[in-house]
């Protein structure tokens, strides 16, 4: 690193976890956000009494998640809803390369439903990271709540993947 201010930081390990560049995040409070009633705001559907998926929409639970390399990164095990905004915020993913019982969050705005003709099934496609990188997404401390800091780190990981997921993305745009 250069000793002058304004010099860019270099990643030290996994650049998607280093919190720099497109993976930067704010040091928010390490407590869950709450509704006006004081309840945890973002929870999995299994813990959101009175919430269900719309019948007309595809149910993502059980779908495979595919990374930018078209490799399976995991399977959707639940959806996390924002009880104040009444919308899905995250997909809960069991990583294919993770330990038994591992679950990570995938922000909905990083995923797109795809139907692969060659595979004949619906999947969620994620351009930001590769299939194997799902195993390294920052996890939540508790299985049924996410803190504001944990949200930031998850978004930072996927944002960092847009630049750092593959070596080819880091180089110049014009060759």
Image: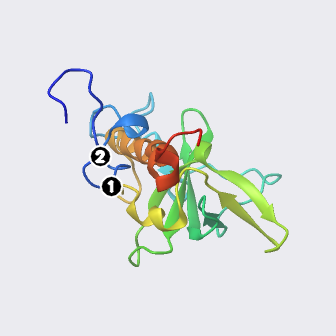
Q: Residue 90, position in %: x, y?
A: 54, 49
Placement of 152 over or under 65, stated as above or below: above
Q: Residue 31, position in %: x, y?
A: 29, 40
Residue extending furthest toward the bottom? 100
Mark drawn on residue 11: 2
**Residue hosting label 1:** 14
- Residue 119 relative to residue 17: left or right: right
- Residue 3 relative to residue 66: left or right: left
Q: Residue at x 54, y 66 (%)?
A: 131
Q: Are marks 1 and 2 in contact (CB under 8 Å)?
A: yes
Spatial CA distance of label 1 from label 2 is: 7 Å
Residue extending furthest toward the top? 5
Residue extending furthest toward the front? 175
Mark drawn on residue 70: none
Q: Residue at x 32, y 41 (%)?
A: 19
Q: Residues within 10 Å of mark 2 (few under 14, many from 20)?
A: some
Q: Residues within 10 Å of mark 1 (few under 14, many from 20)?
A: few
Q: Residue at x 32, y 55 (%)?
A: 14
Q: Residue at x 36, y 55 (%)?
A: 138
């Amino acid at each position: 690193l250069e000793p002058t201010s304004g010099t860019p930081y270099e990643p030290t390990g996994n650049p998607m976890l280093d919190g720099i560049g497109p993976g930067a995040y704010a040091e928010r409070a390490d407590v869950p956000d709450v509704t006006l009633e004081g309840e945890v705001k973002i929870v999995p559907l299994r813990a959101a009494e009175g919430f269900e998926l719309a019948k007309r929409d595809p149910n993502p639970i059980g779908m495979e998640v595919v990374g930018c390399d078209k490799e399976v990164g995991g399977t959707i095990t639940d959806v996390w809803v924002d009880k104040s905004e009444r919308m899905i915020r995250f997909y809960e993913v069991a990583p294919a390369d993770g330990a038994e019982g591992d679950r990570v969050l995938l922000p909905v705005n990083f995923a797109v439903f795809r139907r692969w003709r060659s595979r004949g099934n619906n999947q969620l496609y994620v351009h930001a990271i590769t299939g194997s990188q799902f195993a390294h997404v920052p996890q939540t401390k508790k299985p049924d709540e996410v803190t504001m800091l944990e949200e930031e780190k998850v978004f930072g990981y996927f944002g960092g993947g847009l630049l750092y997921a593959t070596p080819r993305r880091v180089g110049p745009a014009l060759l």
